[in-house]
């Protein structure tokens, strides 16, 4: 009994340690964003003695930061939407319809996610230049589809496969076309899968850096991660504003993770556990 | 008759997604190989045949061998640490306790935030004069003078690895937790009845059942670590003195800072080969576990 009790205390201590290691860098960034410049130039104080929102205000004064947030949000939402629509269309036949070559197609889909982005960024840059798409939402959106689409196909195929085969057969016997059986019966049952795939696609696009950095040039299409790296600052690094921007871009991520934690985990493990 | 219409519908529905993936993911890879055999400098409109020239130069360039070494070292050390740490945390979180749901959600945060933010976060922590790491180390009496973490070649690569471990361990934890949930409870009870200690039941029950998923996690993480770009580009830019310049960074600089698309593509092809060889080696080493995993697929 006492041995077990000691075991529990030990586990709790370790858990506290893990959470401290996980969360303290994020919390440190939050405190940094709230400190006036004078307190950033020295340590201590560890915690802001005179907390201020000046850095958050400065974000919007030094550049059209609202426009940059809008770019990030619009591109991530459209990426998720496009990947969901195309991914659902592709996942249905891969999961349910009698077709040849399903295995190689799924292998190819998974294979494209293994390519390092640095391999495709050069050729895509030449595409975007030739089509005059540089520094538009399109360039970022199109490049983000290359990782969002395989993800949605993969997650949705796995979700659809888990629905009972009879559901689809029964709908067909009752006179539904394959398309009707898909849209009226299977798709509504696949809501958790759609949420999981959509949230992951949004998150990946919202946080993506390499493509967005390469294809954007101005506020017309620049996303928040790119803006954080290109922070205007002539002589010194403006740590306070960088921290404030980090908090702004991280807040929606925290909300999504806390709300959709189960979906995210389901989406991530769908592929890995079922090969 | 019905079957035929189903197959036709299937190919029609698949077409848009496959067309887009072919155009945006497969074609660029083929173009990369083609570009690597050309002299192509975008702003000057140079476009000439190069054959194997770039590869010959590359194989004699010390900078290439340095970045290959950095890439392998970074991937090997960070993946090893992530899997070890991830396994420990997953075992800890797999226990039933109050607030387990919260702990599992919170642990995901470093993985979900933008890598750029991770890099800036650790950059600020590592600052020699203003950083909190030196402040803590000096106050605890561990160091006496500020350490220049990112300005010292031997330290910078390890500082980057720690930041990468912080960011990606949650991914390992999530997949291993899902794997642990598949281990039947009665196996532990049976082991306990037979008088197995918790260490013995870990080694003889948990680990063998977890091996296939450990292999998958290691494979995913290795591929990801070999192509790491964002973290290093923002945290160190490849410096100091190329000590943290991976193949990805090297390729990017040649592609977009000097606009040599031919030579830069050749570096990309080398990275492709490294990723392919390392993943095939891992699959071969874990071929028995892989077979078990595929065998379980419905």
Image (cartoon, coloured by chain):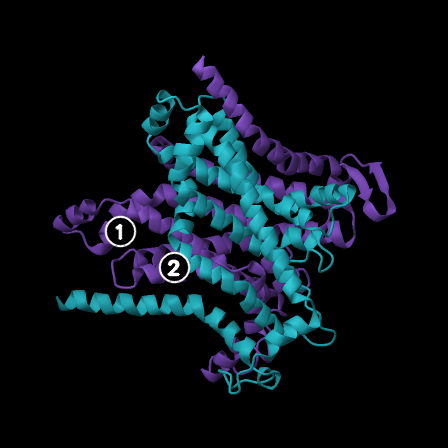
Chain colours: A cyan, B purple
Q: Tell which tag, 1 or 2, sits nearer the viewer.
A: 2
Q: Which mark is residue B80?
A: none
Q: Which mark is residue B202?
A: 1
| Residue A209 placement (x, y as % from top left) | 62, 55
Is disc 1 surrounded by few (<14), some (14 to 19) or many (20+) residues within 10 Å? some
Compare residues B174 and A166 and report the one nearer the observer. Answer: A166
Provide the residue designation for mark 2.
Answer: B105
Q: x, y percentage for residue B230?
A: 60, 57
Viewer-closest of A172 and A217 = A172
Q: Are marks 1 and 2 on the same chain?
A: yes
Q: Secondary structure at mark 1?
A: helix
Residue A58 quadrant = bottom right
Quadrant location of the C terminus of chain B in the rendered image? top left
Q: Position of residue B226 (x, y in %)?
A: 56, 49
Left/right of residue B206 with respect to residue B113 in the rendered view? left
Answer with mark 1 or mark 2, whichever residue precedes in sequence: 2
Q: State which quarter of the image contains the N terminus of chain B.
A: top left
Q: Residue at x 42, y 36 (%)?
A: A187
Residue under the image location 45 percent in, 61 percent down: A255
Front position in the image: B173 or B215: B173
Front residue of this view, candidates A233 and B201: A233
Q: Look at the image and tell me whether residue B215 can be seen.
A: no
């Amino acid at each position: 009994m006492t041995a077990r009790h000691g075991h529990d205390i030990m586990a709790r201590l370790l858990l506290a340690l893990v959470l401290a290691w996980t969360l303290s860098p994020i919390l440190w960034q939050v405190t940094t964003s709230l400190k006036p410049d004078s307190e950033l130039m020295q340590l201590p104080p560890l915690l802001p003695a005179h907390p201020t929102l000046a850095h958050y205000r400065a974000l919007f004064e030094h550049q059209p930061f609202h426009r940059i947030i809008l770019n990030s949000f619009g591109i991530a939402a459209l990426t998720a939407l496009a990947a969901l629509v195309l991914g659902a269309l592709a996942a249905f036949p891969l999961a349910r319809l009698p077709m040849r070559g399903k295995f190689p197609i799924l292998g190819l889909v998974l294979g494209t996610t293994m390519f390092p982005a640095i391999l495709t960024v050069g050729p895509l840059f030449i595409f975007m230049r030739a089509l005059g798409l540089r520094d538009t939402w399109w360039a970022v959106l199109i490049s983000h589809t290359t990782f969002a689409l395989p993800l949605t196909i993969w997650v949705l195929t796995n979700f659809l496969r888990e629905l009972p085969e009879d559901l689809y057969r029964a709908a067909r016997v009752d006179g539904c076309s394959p398309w009707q059986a898909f849209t009226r019966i299977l798709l509504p049952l696949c809501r958790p899968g759609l949420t999981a795939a959509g949230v992951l696609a949004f998150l990946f696009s919202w946080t993506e850096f390499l493509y967005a950095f390469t294809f954007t040039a101005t506020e017309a299409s620049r996303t928040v991660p790119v803006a954080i790296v290109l922070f205007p600052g002539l002589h010194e690094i403006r740590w306070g504003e960088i921290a404030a921007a980090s908090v702004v871009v991280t807040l929606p991520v925290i909300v999504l993770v806390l709300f959709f934690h189960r979906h995210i985990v389901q989406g991530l493990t769908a592929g890995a556990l079922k090969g | 008759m019905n079957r035929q219409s189903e197959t036709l519908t299937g190919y029609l529905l698949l077409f848009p997604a496959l067309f887009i993936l072919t155009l945006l993911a497969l074609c660029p890879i083929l173009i990369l190989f083609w570009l690597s055999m050309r002299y192509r400098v975008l702003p000057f409109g140079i476009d000439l045949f190069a054959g194997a020239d770039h590869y010959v130069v590359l194989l004699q360039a010390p900078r290439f061998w340095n970045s290959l070494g950095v890439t392998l070292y970074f991937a090997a050390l960070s993946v090893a640490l992530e899997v070890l740490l991830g396994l420990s945390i997953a075992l800890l979180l797999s226990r039933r306790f109050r607030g387990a749901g919260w702990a599992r959600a919170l642990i995901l945060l470093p993985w979900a935030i933008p890598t750029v933010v991770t890099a800036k976060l650790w950059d600020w922590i590592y600052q020699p004069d203003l950083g909190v790491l030196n402040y803590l180390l000096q106050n605890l009496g561990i160091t006496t003078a500020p350490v220049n973490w990112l300005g010292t070649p031997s330290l910078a690569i390890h500082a980057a690895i720690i930041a990468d471990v912080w960011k990606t361990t949650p991914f390992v934890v999530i997949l291993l937790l899902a794997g642990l949930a598949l281990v039947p409870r009665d196996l532990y009870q049976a082991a306990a009845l037979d008088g197995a200690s918790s260490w013995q039941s870990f080694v003889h029950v948990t680990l063998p059942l977890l091996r296939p998923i450990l292999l998958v996690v290691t494979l995913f993480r290795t591929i990801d670590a070999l192509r790491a770009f964002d973290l290093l580009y923002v945290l160190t830019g490849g410096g100091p003195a190329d000590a943290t310049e991976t193949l990805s960074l090297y390729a990017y600089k040649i592609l977009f800072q000097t606009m040599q698309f031919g030579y830069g593509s050749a570096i990309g092809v080398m990275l492709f080969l490294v990723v392919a060889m390392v993943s095939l080696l891992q699959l071969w080493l874990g071929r028995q576990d892989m077979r078990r995993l595929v065998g379980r697929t419905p």
